[in-house]
């Protein structure tokens, strides 16, 4: 346990370590693989490592963008986006969509992924992904520090309006989380993890 003798630092003064451990500790994290369409119709697809679900009913998901990226600009302009599940099979293609392309270039073309029309939003979804959430923007928030100073990071929250699930991952009506082998972002510049059936264990919450 982190008791006496533990490494301690104040974040404003630096970590005292070769690499900031924050991302490695808060991880692995699900990947926010976000597809959008600009107001002029240009498609965009990009992964974000700060992503999660924040509410059950209505279902709300969110991701944070360090810097004002095309995804955020498109969502602000259109109020829509799609989240696509990134899996081990799609890892290389997902990584291609993280390339720093000039604004307006199409990551679907670069990665070889198939953009298909969504059912309720104009933003396209990734055909090869086993799960897609079609979302409408609920909040776009610029983060601040403890002194109220604006941080160059933007939090996007969206309500899930429609869901596409590959039928093979529905077992007796229950979604098989581990089946598609979703990937997660770890610490370091290149670390990822994957979830498979062998990593699942069950534990029921106390009833009293």
Image (spheres, helix red, strand yellow):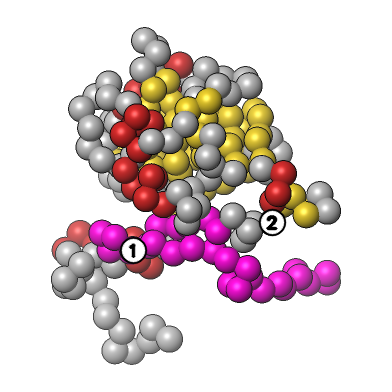
Q: Relative to 95, does residue 126 appear above or below in the rendering?
A: above
Question: Residue 156, can we see it?
Answer: no
Q: Residue at x 33, y 89 (%)?
A: 4
Prevailing SS of the magenta stretch:
loop
Question: Magenta span has 183?
Answer: yes
Q: Quadrant of residue 198?
A: bottom right
Residue for point 75% across, 69% down = 205
Where is residue 150? Give x, y as percent. Answer: 27, 36
**Range of magenta residues:** 181-208
Residue 176 is tagged as 2
Of callouts 1 and 2, the N-terminal one = 2
Quarter of the figure that contains the C terminus: bottom right
Instruction: State left or right for residue 105 relative to residue 31.
Output: left
Q: Residues within 10 Å of mark 1 (few under 14, many from 20)?
A: few
Q: Is residue 127 above or below residue 80?
A: below
Mark 1–mark 2 Cα distance, whole angstroms, equals: 24 Å
SS for callout 1 = loop
């Amino acid at each position: 346990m982190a008791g006496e003798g533990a490494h301690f630092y104040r974040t404003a003064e630096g970590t005292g370590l070769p690499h900031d451990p924050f991302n490695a500790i808060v991880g692995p994290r699900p990947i926010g693989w976000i597809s959008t369409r600009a107001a002029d119709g240009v498609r965009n697809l990009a992964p974000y490592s700060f992503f999660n679900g924040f509410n059950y009913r209505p279902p709300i998901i969110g991701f944070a963008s360090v810097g004002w990226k095309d995804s955020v600009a498109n969502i602000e302009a259109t109020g829509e986006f799609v989240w696509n599940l990134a899996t081990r099979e799609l890892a290389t293609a997902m990584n291609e969509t993280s390339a720093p392309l000039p604004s307006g270039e199409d990551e679907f073309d670069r990665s070889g992924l198939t953009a298909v029309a969504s059912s309720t939003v104009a933003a396209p979804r990734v055909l090869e992904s086993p799960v897609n959430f079609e979302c409408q923007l609920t909040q776009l928030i610029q983060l601040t520090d403890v002194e109220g100073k604006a941080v160059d990071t933007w939090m996007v929250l969206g309500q899930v309006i429609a869901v596409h699930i590959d039928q093979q991952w529905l077992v007796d009506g229950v979604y098989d989380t581990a089946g598609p082998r979703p990937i997660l972002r770890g610490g370091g510049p290149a670390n990822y993890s994957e979830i498979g059936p062998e990593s699942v264990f069950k534990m029921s919450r106390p009833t009293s």
